[in-house]
Amino acid sequence: MTSSENSQPAASPVPAPGETAPDATPTRGPAHPVPAVTDAPTEAPVAGEGVAPEDLAAVARQLGREPRGVVGVAHRCPCGDPDVLATASRLPDGTPFPTTFYATCPRLTGAISTLESAGLMKDMSERLAADPDLAERYCAAHEDYLRRRARLGDVPEIDGISAGGMPERVKCLHVLAGHALAAGPGVNPLGDETLAALPDWWAHGSCTRAPEEEARP
C-alpha cells in the first residue's frame, strides 16, 4: 500500500488533534522527534486557511504536486518541514477523503513502503487475530481516529470508516504511522510499532532543501 490511503487506554481522555496523549512518552527517542504537533485545527476549517505558505510549498516539493485539502500540519520532522498533514475529510472537489493524517515526507514514506514489502503488515494482521489485548487497543485507535476526524467536519459517506484497515486489519502502514506521529505515542499500537521499526529518516536533513541551504546560518 502507499500513503494515499492516507492504544490509548479506554479510560484516558482523547486529546484534540495536535495534542499529545496524556502521560505518553516516546518509546524510541527520535521516533517521535517533535511533540505531536502543531497547528492542526480543532474545528472544521476551510482547507488551506491558517496553513503557512512555506509549509504548503514544502509539501508541494515533497509530493511533486500541490497538496489538496490541507487543514494543518499534524507533525513536523526535526528538520522543521512537515512530514504529516491533517487533511480535510472532503477534498475541494467534493471527494470524501478518509485519510485524516497523510504522510508526505518521501524519506518517511519510502522507509514505510520498505517495511510493507518486507511483510510487516501480514505479521501484524496475524498477531491481531491471535492477541485479544492488541486487537482491543487497535480498535481503540480506530475510534480515536474517527473522533479526531469528526472535529474536522462530518462526511456521511465515510461515517464509521477510519483508514489503514482499522479496526480489524492492517492494510496501510503509512496511515498507522501518520496517526501515531500526529497523536503521539500510546494511541495507535501498530503505528507505534511501525515507527519503532523505521530507520532515522530525518538523519540527512531536509528532504525539500539542498544541502548547501541546510548549511546556511
Image: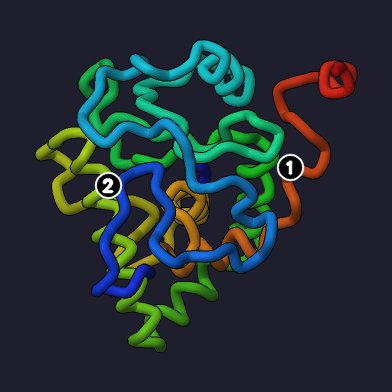
134 to the left or right of 216:
left
Quadrant assignment for the C terminus: top right
Q: Name the one closer to the observer, 206 or 64.
A: 206
Tell me which residue sits at (38%, 69%) in the image. Answer: 7
- Circle 2 packing at 10 Å, graded few (<14), some (14-19), many (20+), is many
Q: Is residue 216 left or right of residue 150?
A: right
Residue drawn where x is 68% and y is 40% of the image: 78
Say few, some or many: other residues with alpha carbon within 10 Å of mark 1 (under 14 / 14 to 19 / 20 or more): some
Mark 2 lies on a secondary structure that is helix
Asked where in the image residue 130 lies, by quadrant, the reply is bottom left
User: Which residue type carries mark 1?
Assistant: Trp
- Whole-angstrom CA distance, mark 2 to mark 1, is 26 Å
Q: Determine which of the numbered discs, if any, sits on residue 202 in the image.
A: 1
Q: Viewer-proximal residue, 207 or 20?
A: 20
Compared across the picture, whether 157 is left or right of 6 comes to: left
Pointer 2 residue: 148
Q: Position of residue 67 (x, y in %)?
A: 46, 20
Query: Residue 118 vs residue 46: left or right?
Result: right
